[in-house]
Amino acid sequence: MWEDNSKPRLLKFHSRKSKFVTQEIYAGIIMYNMTIVISGCITIKKKSIKYEYQIQISTAANIVKKLLTGGVDPPSVEILLARNISPIRPNRHYPRKKKSVKAPVNFMYRTS
């Protein structure tokens, strides 16, 4: 339900029936809430550091997804989330650098 930048995708669904679209929306909301609750339980150790740190939500969503599918053990989730932190830098408002869009690849060479 989430892309890499943790924004919900509510324009593309995996089904046509309204019941399944509703189910997909609820699943995304539950996944988001579970990610926020688990991320909120993690304490970040404060050392003599310059910035305060926060957990990256997009990485946390991927870790929680692996937890639900059985790819990660529950005790290791806290360690993985504590590793993926980023500094909070106040007064930093730079425009985000956009990646160049790659041209589509032509697969006509395979038809020979």
Image (tube, grey):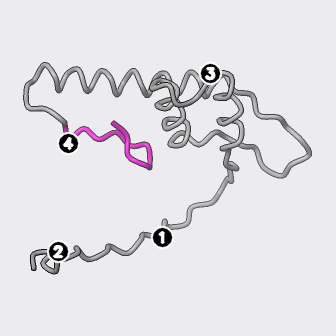
| Magenta span | 1-13
Q: Nearer the viewer, mark 4 or mark 3?
A: 3
Name the mark nearer the viewer: 4 or 1. 4
Measured along the vertical axis of the image, is residue 89 above or below residue 16?
A: below
The residue beneath circle 4 is: 12
Residue 34 in the image: x percent, y percent? Answer: 49, 22
Q: Which residue in the structure is indicated by mark 3?
A: 74
Q: Residue at x 62, y 60 (%)?
A: 92
Q: Which residue is mark 2?
A: 107
Check contact, mark 1 vs mark 2: CB within 8 A: no
Residue at which label 1 appears: 97
- Badge 4 or badge 1: first in the primary sequence: 4
Query: Disc 4 to disc 1, how far (Cα)?
Result: 25 Å
Q: Nearer the viewer, residue 112 or 1?
A: 112
Q: Nearer the viewer, mark 2 or mark 3?
A: 2
Real-space Cα distance between discs 2 and 3?
A: 43 Å
Q: CA distance from mark 1 to mark 3?
A: 36 Å
Residue 12, magenta (yes or no):
yes
